[in-house]
Amino acid sequence: MPKSRKRILTGDRPTGALHLGHYVGSLANRVKLQDDYESYIIIADVQALTTHWEKDENLTRDVFQIATDYLAAGINPEKSTIFIQSRIPEIHELTMYFSMYTSVNVLRHNPTIKSEAAQHGFKDITYGFLGYPVSQTADIAIFKADLVPVGEDQIPHIELARKIVRRFNDLYKPVLVEPQVLIGDIPRLIGLDGKAKMSKSLNNAIFLMDSPLEVEQKVQNAVTDPARIRKTDPGHPEVCTIFEYQKVFNPGEVEQIENECRQGKIGCVACKKNLASKLNLLLEPMRERRQKYSDRSLVMDILKEGTNRAHQVARETMADVREAMNINYFA
Ligand code: TRP
């Protein structure tokens, strides 16, 4: 099938509910990009097994959770193809071929692999975990994706993907497309604790599925400038987590808020109320869409259809790959 528009591929491991950090870091961008690109979104359930390999009752739940979060955030299934990695066996076949000529040392020195292994406290690492950048390369290459919009931590993986694809094209036949990283200039969103990036496991997140009241309460409980005890004390927005959020979610008022905070004219409670209302304004349309998708069979149908569509593309690429490698015995 000839491509008319450039193709992008991106996705996530299904490991729990998505939060505002995901929204500003990638989802908002994906919602925009789907208008101009042929857009594929992978739910990387096999990659989730690289760190959560024990029999996981949560995996099915997490796949539905992330699919529903995507749809709520505004990913439009008419424009974007959402699909499940494990259900496309050709990805795993291509991973195997790539792994024949990919160096173990290169994988061992991959900075993202190293920091994730440390983060998980792995003393030893599994073959599957060490190799997930190879599998991720297959995710991308099998769709002949031109662009991969990802965060900074993924750059080493996309660089490796480019090398693996280039090598394939040299070794066999130039049938694969060298992907390029499409990096957004969006900074990581800090968590409500003001200490680390927003993350489910650190318990400092506002989830896309939080209710208006939960949003208000989380915002009211967030840390602000510790030097500010009374409303009239001059504030220091540069050390305030809420101010970080005002910059991202309330750009129209941020200058005024900064001035009033420094002069002790606006108190933290009022500032937080203001922010919570802006966040709820952003989340309201997502809540409406989520309501629409509360029927699980609708989400299931979207996943099935997306996976079928993706599978068709993967089959076509693999026919080229096998031909290039001289292993298309029965073609
Ligand atoms: N590694 C990505 C993450 O953890 C998820 C992912 C899997 C991915 N396959 C991909 C991202 C292909 C981009 C392209 O977020």
Image: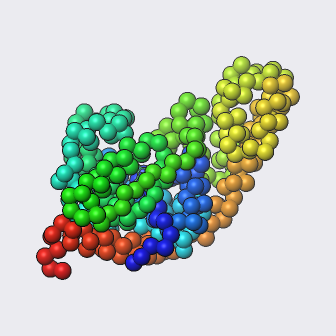
Q: Residue at x 25, y 54 (%)?
A: 167
**Residue at 69% across, 27% down:** 238
Q: Nearer the viewer, residue 305 or 147?
A: 147
Q: Is any part of residue 36 visible from this angle? A: yes
Report the residue at 57% width, 40% height from top: 187
| Snapshot quadrant of residue 85 | bottom left
Q: Is residue 55 above or below residue 79?
A: above
Q: Which quadrant, please, contains the C terminus?
A: bottom left
Q: Is residue 134 left or right of residue 279?
A: left
Q: Position of residue 329 (x, y in %)?
A: 13, 76
x and y percentages locating residue 244 in the rendered image: 67, 36
The residue at the point 70 percent across, 45 percent down is 249
> Is residue 300 something one can see in this rendering?
no
- Quadrant, the N terminus: bottom left
In this view, 193 is above or below 44: above
The extreme left residue here reads: 329
In terms of depth relative to the viewer, which is nearer, 210 or 117? 117
